Amino acid sequence: MSVAHPPFRLDGRIAWITGSSRGLGRIIAETLAAAGARTVVNCFANRAAGEAVVEGIRAAGGEAMLVAGDVTNEAEVDRMAGEIEAGFGPVDIVVANATPHQPMKKLEDYTWEDHESMLEAFVKSPFLLAKRLVPGMKAEGRGRIINITSEVYHLGMAEFSAYVAAKGGQIGWSRSMANELAPHGITVNTVAPGWIPVERHDEVAEEHKASYLATVPLGRWGRPADIAHAVNYFASCEASFLTGQTLVVNGGRTIW
């Protein structure tokens, strides 16, 4: 009689989470590590913050390493992937989570440079990561690409058009990749969080937070762990028959 393994485990997998030195990315990294993945923490400039996440994962009994670099730069992506391969082996789970500042402006006040910065983060970076990592995934006959998008695309949020457009591009690219890579055992899915307050939202006015919370049907704030568990599911064997999907995690603000 065979003994079933615990569900949603990632033992033996190597997971690279971009933008994981703080915020949602940090909780995603910690969650995947707790599920057994050898976890790659990724920071852009704040090595101390990244190293603290790695140390925390190791203290909890997990395996982790840090890579530092710009995931919108092809040479940097290649260098970091090489460091991961040398330290842990080929990546079979990549979570594109890194995000820059997201400007909110009226159409007349946006510049094309604003749009380019969003496209660099949410279309170019997932492309560069996949281009570098997919050959290894194809060789293994398995892979997980998970892109962190946003509810703003589904809401068509006003005065946020650069961010919304880039997130729409990220979702469209993911859907195309899901079809292209399915024959190789590689799934491509997206997790679209609602507003999950993290460190970078500390200065947001309380009345603004209250007005958002009032629109959440489940009546509470989303937690970083809510997003991390959705990512863990998509990364697991249990989600092997799911690809090209977007899971909107926002307490019911978008129901369709």
Image: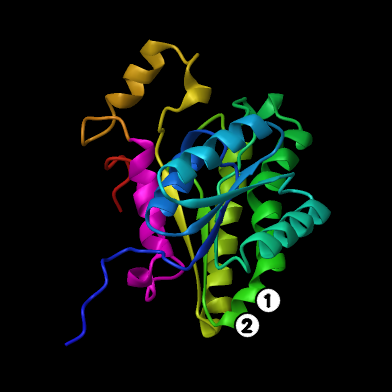
Residue 59: % across, % down: 45, 41
Give whichever of 54, 179 is nearer the camera.
Answer: 54
Would you call the spot at circle 2 few (<14 residues within 10 Å), some (14-19), or many (20 or more)? few
Residue 60's place in the image compared with 217, above or below, is: below
Q: Measured from the top left, where is residue 40 in percent x and y? A: 58, 52
Residue furthest left as drawn: 1
Residue 247 occupies quadrant: bottom left
Q: Is residue 59 magenta?
A: no
Q: Would residue 30 appear left or right of 86 to someone viewing this image?
A: left
Q: Is residue 102 above or below residue 155?
A: above
Residue annotated with mark 2: 139
Residue found at x 22% / y 35%? 217
Residue located at (29% from left, 49% from top) = 255
Mark 1 crowdedness (10 Å alpha carbons): few <14, some 14-19, many ≥20 = few
In the rendered image, which residue does mark 1 sit on? Answer: 135
Asked if residue 201 can be seen in this view, the reply is: yes
x, y percent for residue 110: 70, 29
Q: Residue at x 56, y 29 (%)?
A: 159
Q: How many marks?
A: 2
Task: Identify the secondary structure beneath mark 1.
Answer: helix
Q: Amino acid at mark 1?
A: Pro
Residue 196 placement: quadrant: top left
Magenta span has 225?
Answer: yes
- Asked whether 219 or 162 is in front, the reply is 219
Horizontally, residue 16 falls left or right of residue 80, namely: left
Q: Locate the N terminus and report the quarter of the image it occupies.
A: bottom left
| Residue closest to the far right | 75
Disc 1, disc 2: CB below 8 Å?
yes
Give the magenta-colored segment's residue range: 223-249
